[in-house]
């Protein structure tokens, strides 16, 4: 739409309004407006007046030059505000102070906005063309800028001081007018006209400084007077209050900055002193199970960068100390007490370690919200004390023994199925902390073998269940042999049935003695020492019969007989009453000698059976010097010597009809450790070769560290051992040293 | 809120139209929505000493046409050629 047209075509004639005249009229409107704002009795504008004022401006802007007064009106618009501010607004503000000044300011600002709204509507035509054409600040902005330049700039510092004084007053517990502060601070925001600059520079920065020093003062006295929990409560309360403060009257953008300042003064500056407070600090809280206080500590330090690290550290130290104390306790008990009580103590230790783990896992999950730092701390703590030896037994062995006790018949633990499952679950979790997992596997395997072979397993489901759990945690390779063992037994039972059928069909082959044979797959089972012995003829026949049967089933397998694991039931024809004796095969071999002779010397027996001294002494001791004296020894000393002689003790009797005569078990521990060491040498070799094959050339340090990493899932390899294996592989031409750099190794294909 | 507004031409002709129609004019809209504005007790009565009856009538028609158009009834608004210039002037004044 074009602005103007030639007058000729108009029927209407407008009288030209002269500037002074027009402005006088506008002035009446402005005066009326001022009276309304000042609260004087003055009726509101009606539509007539409104349109007249609007039209006056319109006409003065659409008149032909030189009567086009747009520029002058634009200037006079600004001057109207300036005049009002200088004559009325500023004086009213300057004569007041503190809270009164704030109230006046809020009122004046509100009025000013109303004034801008009205005047900009009357003068609106300027916004449409004049201002747009010349890219001048629009009417709204001009109005606000007047206030900013003349009022705000004069007073903002004084206002800021008054506001901060009120804030500190509220902090000290006094009631203040929050709505007033909100209105005042809204001015800082609005005066920025879209930018937060003024609010930040003229108010916020000072408020933050003041807040920091306020809390610094408070903190320095609280840290002396208060206990850690009390200090934390106060801090939490302060943070809560400050957040409320933001919600009530500060601008929301101040929240993170204010919180950071308060946190810094209360929690960061004094972190060390707070956590390390002697009787109420972190250590004490852990000691006294102050779960709520610890949760608070977590909440407070969680939001501070690196704030949780010292807490996690103290937690780790505490758990480690508790664990070490348990281990020490078990160690002390073991050295002071008899062997069997000591072993019970060792089992108690495992129980206690499990309980410790449960207890502090709850802490990690509940107090510390499952934060990774605390999971890590718990893990590292357990790794420290779970790998300590107690009275010569490694933790791996203790754990295996613990499992054995749960899984065997008549074990020391009498628990419900659920409790057993739960305990097994926890045991497997503990295994994660033990570095010598392969050692555990070997001890476990040995004990599993014993349970399976001597029918001492209490519950098949539990046996399978723990193998599943171990498989999940440590991988299939860990449990493959053990699973093989369990399967072997099932097959062995089927095999026995076939054997009995075979005997039924071949009565001539029958050895005349009930024979049960369990055939085991060599690779799955632990290796057993079995010393050669001259078997009595009855047993020799049994062996041959079974061999005959077995060859009908498979031709290409070799059977190796492990007599040390065999059991024999003999009928002892004693004077008083016959008693069934359950003995090992070796013991039976000794006793059967007395079927043909009444009395035998040590040497007789030695020659006839072809045994070593060590083994024979053990056997004879169990039959003549232990609880059940089946043989009488001459002389009847407590130990067996090579000059003794033995006789069948016809006078022997017992109230039971069947008795078991145990052989003291050989100490497995040494063998297990030896076997594991051997396997480790192979594992290290394999790892080195694997690494070198893929890398071709590698430096010494790197090779060692990669080796350690690869093997860490099963055990912690000894650095010396790795070096030794490397040398060995060099002599076997798997690797060579680089000629120029002896620290570099090369793979030889 | 009063539903109607009265617009008076230079000759004194009164046009009573819907408030909604009148607010098609930005100028009239600004006035009606001013703070301390025109409540039920006050009439929305506006006198236009510079606008003739013919033009004012046409403008009122335009208001209604504009409302219909914005509601989807897309017809043409016919302007008699002799009225064009005055109508444009009035439109500028009324910010329509």
Image: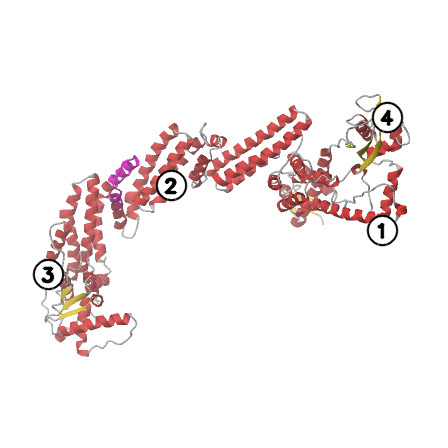
Counting from the top left corner in percent of width and height, residue A104 is at 19, 44
Query: Of callouts 4 and 3, which one flags the residue occurring earlier in the amino acid sequence?
Result: 3
Dot 2 and dot 4 within a common chain: yes
The answer to whether the residue labelled 2 contacts the one labelled 1, judged by CB atoms less than 8 Å apart, is no
Counting from the top left corner in percent of width and height, residue A516 is at 81, 43
**Quick check: is A69 in the magenta stretch?**
no
Side (left or right) of A130 relative to A476: left
Instruction: Tell me the number on the disc at residue A552.
Output: 1
Give the Cα distance between marks 2 and 1.
85 Å
| Residue range (magenta) | A161-182
According to the picture, the residue beneath numbered tag 3 turns out to be A22
Counting from the top left corner in percent of width and height, residue B88 is at 19, 72
Which subunit holds the residue at mark 3?
A: A
Instruction: Tell me the number on the disc at residue B75.
Output: none
Q: Viewer-nearest of labels 2 and 1?
A: 1
According to the picture, the residue beneath numbered tag 2 turns out to be A260
Q: Residues within 10 Å of mark 1 (few under 14, many from 20)?
A: few
Q: Judging from the image, what secondary structure is the residue with disc 1 in?
A: helix
Q: How many marks?
A: 4
Query: Of callouts 4 and 1, which one flags the residue occurring earlier in the amino acid sequence?
Result: 1
Dot 4 and dot 3 within a common chain: yes
Which subunit holds the residue at mark 4?
A: A
Q: Judging from the image, what secondary structure is the residue with disc 3 in?
A: helix
Side (left or right) of A143 relative to A200: left
According to the picture, the residue beneath numbered tag 4 turns out to be A646
Which subunit holds the residue at mark 2?
A: A
The answer to whether the residue labelled 3 contacts the one labelled 1, judged by CB atoms less than 8 Å apart, is no
Q: Viewer-nearest of labels 4 and 3?
A: 4
């Amino acid at each position: 739409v074009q602005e103007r047209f030639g007058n000729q075509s108009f029927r209407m004639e407008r009288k030209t309004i002269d500037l002074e005249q027009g402005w006088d009229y506008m002035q009446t409107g402005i005066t009326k407006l001022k009276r309304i704002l000042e609260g004087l009795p003055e009726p509101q504008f009606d539509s007539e007046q409104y349109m007249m004022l609007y039209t006056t401006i319109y006409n003065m802007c659409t008149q032909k030059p030189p009567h086009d007064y747009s520029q002058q009106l634009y200037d006079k618009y600004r001057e109207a505000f300036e005049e009002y501010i200088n004559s009325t607004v500023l004086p009213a503000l300057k004569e007041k102070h503190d809270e009164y000044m704030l109230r006046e300011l809020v009122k004046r600002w509100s009025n000013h906005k109303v004034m801008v709204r009205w005047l900009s509507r009357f003068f609106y035509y300027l916004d449409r063309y004049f201002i747009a054409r010349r890219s001048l600040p629009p009417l709204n902005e001009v109005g606000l800028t007047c206030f900013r330049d003349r009022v705000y700039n004069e007073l903002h510092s004084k206002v800021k001081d008054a506001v901060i004084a009120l804030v500190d007053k509220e902090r000290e517990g006094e009631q203040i007018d929050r709505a007033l502060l909100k209105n005042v601070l809204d001015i800082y925001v609005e005066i920025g006209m879209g930018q937060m600059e003024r609010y930040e520079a003229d108010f916020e920065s000072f408020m933050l400084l003041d807040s920091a020093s306020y809390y610094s003062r408070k903190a320095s006295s609280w840290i002396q007077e208060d206990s850690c929990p009390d200090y934390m409560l106060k801090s939490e309360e302060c943070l809560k209050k400050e957040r409320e403060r933001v919600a009530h009257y500060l601008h929301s953008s101040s929240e993170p900055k204010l919180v950071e300042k308060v946190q810094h003064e209360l929690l960061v500056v004094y972190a060390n002193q707070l956590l390390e407070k002697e009787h109420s600090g972190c250590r004490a809280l852990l000691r006294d199970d102050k779960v709520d206080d610890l949760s608070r500590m977590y909440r407070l330090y969680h939001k501070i960068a690196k704030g949780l690290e010292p807490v996690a550290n103290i937690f780790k130290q505490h758990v480690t100390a508790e664990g070490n104390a348990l281990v020490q306790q078990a160690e002390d008990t073991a050295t002071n007490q008899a062997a069997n009580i000591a072993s019970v103590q060792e089992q108690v230790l495992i129980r206690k370690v499990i309980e410790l783990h449960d207890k502090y896992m709850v802490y990690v999950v509940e107090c510390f919200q499952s934060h990774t730092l605390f999971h890590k701390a718990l893990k590292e703590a357990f790794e420290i004390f779970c790998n300590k030896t107690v009275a010569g037994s490694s933790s791996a062995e203790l754990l295996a023994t613990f499992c054995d006790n749960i899984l065997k018949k008549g074990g020391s633990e009498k628990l419900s199925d659920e409790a057993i499952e739960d305990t097994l679950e926890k045991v497997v979790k503990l295994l994660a902390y033990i570095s010598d997992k392969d050692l555990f596997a070997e001890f476990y395997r040995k004990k599993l073998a014993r349970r399976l072979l001597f029918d001492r397993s209490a519950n098949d489901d539990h046996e399978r269940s723990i193998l599943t759990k171990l498989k999940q945690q440590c991988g299939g390779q860990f449990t493959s042999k053990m699973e093989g063992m369990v399967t072997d037994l099932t097959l062995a039972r089927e095999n026995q049935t076939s054997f009995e059928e075979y005997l039924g069909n071949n009565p001539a082959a029958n050895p005349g003695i009930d024979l049960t044979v369990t055939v085991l797959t060599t690779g799955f089972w632990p290796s057993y020492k079995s010393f050669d012995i001259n078997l009595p003829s009855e047993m020799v026949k049994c062996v041959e019969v079974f061999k005959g049967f077995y060859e009908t089933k498979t031709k290409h397998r070799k059977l190796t007989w492990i007599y040390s694991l065999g059991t024999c039931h003999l009928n002892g024809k004693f004077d008083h009453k016959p008693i069934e004796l359950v003995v090992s095969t070796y013991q039976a071999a000794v006793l059967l000698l007395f079927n043909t002779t009444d009395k035998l010397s040590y040497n007789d027996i030695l020659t006839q059976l072809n045994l070593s001294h060590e083994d024979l002494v053990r056997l004879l001791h169990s039959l003549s010097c232990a609880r059940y004296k089946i043989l009488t020894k001459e002389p009847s000393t407590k130990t067996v010597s090579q000059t003794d002689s033995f006789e069948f003790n016809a006078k022997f009797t017992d109230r039971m009809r069947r008795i078991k005569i145990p052989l003291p078990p050989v100490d497995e521990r040494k063998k297990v450790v030896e076997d594991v060491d051997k396997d480790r040498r192979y594992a290290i070799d394999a790892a080195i070769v694997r690494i070198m094959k893929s890398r071709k050339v590698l430096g010494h340090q790197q090779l060692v560290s990669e080796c350690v990493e690869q093997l860490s899932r099963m055990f912690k390899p000894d650095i010396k051992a790795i070096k030794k294996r490397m040398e060995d592989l060099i002599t076997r031409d798997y690797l060579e040293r680089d000629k120029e750099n002896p620290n570099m190794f090369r793979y030889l294909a | 809120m009063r539903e109607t507004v009265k617009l008076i031409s230079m000759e004194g002709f009164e046009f009573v139209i819907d408030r909604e129609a009148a607010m098609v004019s930005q100028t009239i809209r600004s006035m009606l929505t001013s703070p301390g504005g025109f409540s039920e007790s006050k009439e929305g009565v506006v006198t236009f000493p510079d606008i003739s009856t013919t033009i004012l009538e046409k403008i009122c028609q335009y208001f209604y046409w504009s409302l219909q158009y914005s509601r989807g009834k897309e017809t043409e608004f016919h302007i008699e050629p002799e009225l064009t210039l005055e109508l444009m002037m009035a439109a500028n004044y009324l910010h329509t």
